[in-house]
Image (tube, rainbow, N blue to C red):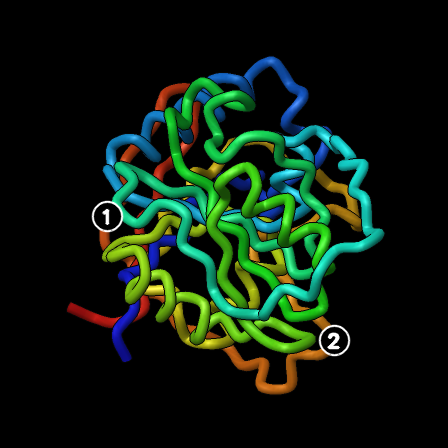
Amino acid sequence: MERPYIICHMLTSLDGKIIGDYLKEERAAYFTDEYEKIHGRYGCKAWMCGRVTMEEHFTFGHQLDLNHDNIPTIPRTDYVAIQDAKSYVIAVDPSGKLGWTENSIAPWNEDRLEDHIIEVLTEQVSDAYLAHLKNIGISYIFGGKEQLNFTVVVEKLKKLFSIDELMLEGGGFINGSLLNEGLIDELSLILVPIADGASNSVTLFETSSFLTKQHPVNFFLKEVEKLDDGGLWLKYVTKRD
């Protein structure tokens, strides 16, 4: 299988939560800054997030006012708007809900430069949304008819966009989906020395009810780096060297 080398890069509380009130603590700001710095140190050409993460941090819930009338049927075939971008952001958005208005991430986050947006969709997406993406120059690929097959998705990212390394950055359900398909090669984990304690907070790897092959995955410690104020940067791989 020809696919990118995939690094899951995440930040969690001591009890494994990737979101929660612990991130509002004053101490947490240092660790979120370190997270961005380490993201840059990897130098990956592409990074991937799920729809909920994208809405929270980048599109901020913006809703598109699309005209669904008189839209011709658009074939459910992959669309490459920019093939040789310097960097890419892959938005996992099965139904096509993210309210993009430009084709790079820069307008929403100054830390992520001019990353070209690639939408990952199912064939259930509307023709109006596909027309909108084409109109503003956003690339898109299909990962399944009704549900996403991430093995297909990452193979397309390699084939269509020459992406050799990919950073997976949440949320918990997309992390769990790629883990379940055996697609995570490395884990870069920033451990924040704060316990969240909430029982309903999303953890590092979550599983969806439609996943039928859930099984434990072994990780092997590669390196540990101490951060200031009691934090750790842990690096694991899923195969022994």
Q: Name the residue at the top extreme.
A: 26
Closer to the camera in the image, 207 or 193: 207
Residue 206 image offset from top left, x and y in percent: 64, 62
The amino acid beneath tag 1 is: Glu
114 relative to 150 in the view: left or right: left
Q: Residue at x 67, y 21 (%)?
A: 24
Q: Residues within 10 Å of mark 1 (few under 14, many from 20)?
A: few
Mark 2 vs mark 1: give the one in front. Answer: 2
In the picture shown, does residue 50 fall above or below 116? below
State the CA–CA distance, disc 2 to disc 1.
33 Å
- Residue receiving disc 1: 223
Total residue callouts = 2
Q: Is residue 220 visible?
A: no
Q: Position of residue 150 (x, y in %)?
A: 49, 70
Q: Which of the 4 image quarters holds residue 183?
A: bottom left
**Can you see residue 6?**
yes
> Which of the two residues, 72 or 32, is positioned nearer the viewer here?
72
Please state, as top left, top right, bottom left or bottom right, where the N terminus lies in the image.
bottom left
Task: Return the x and y of residue 122 as percentages of the image width and height.
Answer: 63, 68
Q: Nearer the viewer, residue 81 or 4?
A: 81
The image position of residue 3, as x and y in percent, is 29, 69
Q: Residue furthest left?
A: 241
Q: Residue at x 15, y 68 (%)?
A: 241
Mark seen at residue 129: none
Residue type at mark 2: give it.
Ser
* Residue 3 left/right relative to 232: left
Q: Secondary structure at mark 1?
A: strand
The earlier-in-sequence mark between 2 and 1 is 2
Q: Residue at x 65, y 61 (%)?
A: 94
Residue 231 found in image quarter? top left
- Circle 2 is placed at which residue position? 209
Q: Residue at x 63, y 54 (%)?
A: 130
